[in-house]
Amino acid sequence: MATIAFIGLGNMGGPMAANLVKAGHKVIAFDLVEASRSQAKADGAAIADSAAGAVKGADIVVTMLPAGKHVLSVWNEVVPAMAKGALIIDSSTIDVESARQAHALAGKQGVLSIDAPVSGGTGGAKAATLTFMCGGDDKAFAAAKPVLEKMGKKIVHCGGAGAGQAAKICNNMILGISMIAVSEAFALAEKLGLSHQALFDVASTSSGQCWSLTTYCPVPGPVPTSPANNDYRPGFASALMVKDLTLAQDAAKAAGAATPLGKHAQEIYQAFDAAGQGGVDFSGIIKHVRGLAGKA
């Protein structure tokens, strides 16, 4: 089995690293947060003193970090310490340009690289059912796929450098827009005297059906496993939806694409975040939508 360095052990990275340990890999982990390091140790990973220390002798390096600047900072530190022909995978959600810069950095050092952001949330990270959206050349993807399969159930090669990040931000723009649409529909149904279950029974089997309704329903009851049934504990926090919608808008501007609904969704989630709701699951946006009725 491979020796894998895992850098970034937060709500997503920690469970992902644990699944690599369960799969029989030797995992050497690092995070700046003591509690995250302690949990990784309890999960069976060895703990390094630094990011650069974690990658020495590693066949594969995985990073899971907050933003592009963190990825570039860590890659600048660790890639020179990696063996030529080794593989580095970034599963952070970052801007496409930073992802491409990271690939270029790895290429200069003779290191294979893949951007592989994920979908599936903390539940998917724990259950090893994540979807990985991958960008990079065929050789790097072939090397990464067996490892990614230990952390996810669907591994998609989206294209060259940065294509994984492009797919992720497009997907999450759809997700943000659709959750607002579903929330507006339930808010309207409430005003019209239609029960949550009645709307769900119709829309979930009709042309209005979508993931935000059938899997992540923003009202309690119809889908018992959705965060709405747990007081909107995330899940996927609204602050992270703001981040992803902002990445989508930045990419749209850079590419010259028009995304008016994406922009409006960003503004709605920014308002929700500014109201102190950034830690609430993104499906909690229905509370914001209901509140807008009094301001109309």
Image (tube, grey):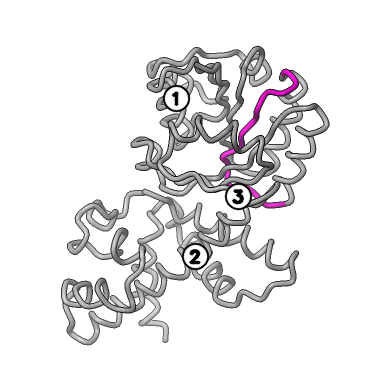
Q: CA distance from mark 1 to mark 2?
A: 34 Å
Dots 2, 3 in contact, CB < 8 A: no
Q: Quadrant of residue 143?
A: top right
Along the viewing direction, whichever of 8 and 205 lies nearer the viewer = 205
Does 127 sit left or right of 118 as displayed?
A: left
At 49% from the left and 66% from the top, the residue drawn is 174
Quickly name the residue at label 1.
20
Q: According to the image, label 2 marks what residue?
A: 269
The kind of secondary structure element at disc 2 is helix
Of pointers 2 and 3, the one earlier in the residue sequence: 3
Camera-nearest label, 1 or 2 = 1
Mark closer to the observer (2, 3): 3
Q: Amino acid at mark 3?
A: Gly
First to last magenta residue range: 83-96
Q: Secondary structure at mark 3?
A: helix
Residue under label 3:
164
Q: Residue 243's quadrant in the figure?
A: bottom right
Badge 1 vs badge 2, beta-carbon distance below 8 Å: no
Residue 70: % across, % down: 67, 37
- Within 10 Å of disc 3 (Cα), the crowding (few <14, some 14-19, many 20+) is many
Give the SS element for disc 1: helix
Q: Amino acid at mark 2?
A: Tyr
Of 273 and 58, which appears nearest the observer?
58
Residue 58 spot, x, y in % from top left: 62, 17
Residue 183, image x and y in percent?
35, 72
Whether residue 199 is in magenta: the answer is no
Q: Amino acid at mark 1?
A: Leu
* Crowd band around label 2 with a 10 angstrom C-alpha radius: few (<14), some (14–19), many (20+): many
Earlier sequence position, callout 1 versus callout 3: 1
